[in-house]
């Protein structure tokens, strides 16, 4: 990880501003069709991080339920004024993690991807450097994540389990 923290970012109109306080758990470059459609481009770069490590500096994002590759949907947090998406909450860990859209950082080059996923549907002109981990669909966490990230996720697991249990109750 080449960045110093915190990093700041925001939407297109300036209403929404956030601060990423620490390194993310992992940075995905996702080439799935859903990400291509949602962004209108070739891939999306998402930095997965515990939600409480991202602070809202200005504005309150609005959540939109949106389909995703998994079939379980995601909630995309958008600026209520310009509707630019700043992060998503995916079904697996819900509101507990944010997948911050790296392109909304003031300096997006600070968070290069750790891994490329869903390269089975990558656009044919996109060339991934041979040294970069890339998977046709997804990967095993232990193969990619830093030890510190694995420990941070383990610390979050009880909250994730409680979240999933609450989903099961409400159906
Ligand atoms: Zn905005
Ligand atoms: Zn995707």
Image: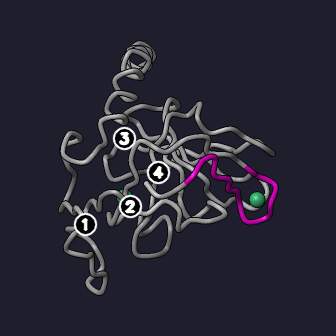
Region of the chain picked out in magenta, as a range: 4-17
Mark 3: few, some, or many residues within 10 Å (few <14, many ≥20)?
few
Q: Which residue is drawn at 20% across and 68% down?
A: 120
First reached walking from the N terminus: tag 1 or tag 2: 2
Comes first in the chain, label 4 or label 2: 4
Q: Which of marks 3 and 4 is nearer the N terminus?
A: 4
Q: Which one is in front, 151 or 127? A: 151
| Residue 32, quarter of picture | bottom left
Label 3 CB, ligand 2: below 8 Å? no
Question: Between 150 and 12, which is closer to the camera in this rendering?
Answer: 150
User: Which percent across, then down, holds residue 53?
Assistant: 58, 35
Mark 1 sits near ligand 2, with its Cβ under 8 Å away = no
Q: Which of marks 2 and 3 is nearer the N terminus?
A: 3
Sequence order check: which comes first, mark 1 or mark 3?
3
- Can you give x and y, in whole percent of width and height, for residue 110 in the image? 53, 62
Give the dominant element type of the magenta stretch: helix, strand or loop. Answer: loop
Q: Which of 121 and 150 is in front in this view?
A: 150
Residue for badge 4: 47
Decide: few, some or many residues near mark 4? Use Cα within 10 Å; few <14, some 14-19, many ≥20: many
Name the mark on residue 132. 1
**Residue 160 to residue 100: above or below:** above
Q: Earlier in the sequence, mark 4 or mark 1?
A: 4
Give residue 165's position: percent from left, percent from top: 38, 14
Q: Is residue 126 above or below residue 101?
A: below
**Residue at the image position 50 percent from the left and 44 percent from the top:** 23
Q: Mark 3 points at which residue?
A: 72
Number of numbered markers:
4
Label 1–label 2 contact, CB within 8 A: yes
Determine the residue positioned at 22% across, 63% down: 134
- Write down the quadrant of residue 154 in the picture: top left
Query: Is 101 colored magenta in this rendering?
Result: no
**Mark 2 highlights which residue?**
113
């Amino acid at each position: 990880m080449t960045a110093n923290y915190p990093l700041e970012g925001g939407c297109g109109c300036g209403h929404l501003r956030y601060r990423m306080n620490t390194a993310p758990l992992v940075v995905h470059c996702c080439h799935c069709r859903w990400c291509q459609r949602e962004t209108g481009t070739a891939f999306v770069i998402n930095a997965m991080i515990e939600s409480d490590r991202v602070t809202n500096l200005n504005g309150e994002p609005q959540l939109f339920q949106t389909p995703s590759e998994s079939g379980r949907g995601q909630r995309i947090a958008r600026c209520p004024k310009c509707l630019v998406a700043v992060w998503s909450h995916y079904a697996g860990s819900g509101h507990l993690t944010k997948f911050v859209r790296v392109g909304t950082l003031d300096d997006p080059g600070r968070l290069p991807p750790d891994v490329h996923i869903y390269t089975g549907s990558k656009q044919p002109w996109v060339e991934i450097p041979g040294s970069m981990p890339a998977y046709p669909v997804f990967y095993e966490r232990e193969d990619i994540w830093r030890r510190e990230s694995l420990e941070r996720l383990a610390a979050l697991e009880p909250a994730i389990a409680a979240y999933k249990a609450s989903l099961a109750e409400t159906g």
